[in-house]
Image (tube, rainbow, N blue to C red):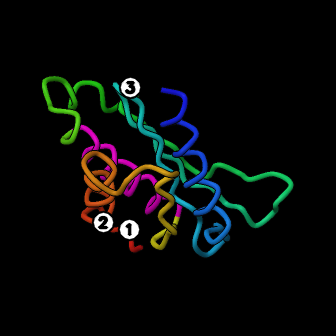
Amino acid sequence: MATKENARLKRKQSIRKRISGSVERPRLSVYRSTQHIYVQVIDDSDSAKSNTVVASSSLDPSLLEALKGLKKRDQAKQVGKKIAELCLAKGIDKVVFDRNGFIYHGRVSALAEGAREGGLKF
């Protein structure tokens, strides 16, 4: 199991060499665990401290009722819509998508679709 995690971390490092968030286009970072999905929008302009602008997850209290009874892929889509809503409220409409070493498939792609439907551009 540790080799799968090491492979993901190597992919993550490779991706992070090329992707960086800025004030105009912050980085939308996704983490997928076995049960939940987490997403945060990060401003990397000050490399000493990367500031999280907004964050959401499938454990978000405002989403718990809406996610009840849904499949994990549908939950991820709802989380994507929620993060888009939070970003638009902060005046962010363009982001850089960071899949964090995860394959762009299943829940990760569903979250991206939800964020796009919510109004984010990437």
What residue is pinned by disc 3? 61
Which is more foreground, mark 1 or mark 3?
Answer: 1
Badge number at residue 120 = 1
* Residue shown at the point (53%, 45%) measured from the top left: 7
The amino acid at mark 1 is Leu
Crowd class of label 2 (few under 14; some 14 to 19; many from 20; radius 10 Å): some
* Residue shown at the point (37%, 29%) measured from the top left: 36
Kindly indicate whether the residue at mark 3 contacts the one at mark 2 (C-beta within 8 angstroms). no
Q: Position of residue 97 (x, y in %)?
A: 47, 64
Q: Which part of the image, by quadrant, shows the C terminus?
A: bottom left
The amino acid at mark 2 is Arg
Kindly indicate whether the residue at mark 2 contacts the one at mark 1 (C-beta within 8 angstroms). yes
Residue sticking out furthest to the front: 3
Please tell me which of labels 2 and 3 falls first in the chain: 3
The amino acid at mark 3 is Pro
Horizontally, is 60 left or right of 47 in the view? Answer: left
Which is more foreground, mark 2 or mark 3?
Answer: 2
Crowd class of label 1 (few under 14; some 14 to 19; many from 20; radius 10 Å): many
CA–CA distance between discs 1 and 2?
A: 5 Å
SS state under label 2: helix
CA–CA distance between discs 1 and 3?
A: 22 Å
Horizontally, is 40 left or right of 51 in the view? Answer: left
Q: Count the marks.
A: 3
What residue is pinned by disc 2? 116
The quarter of the displayed image where residue 47 is located: bottom right
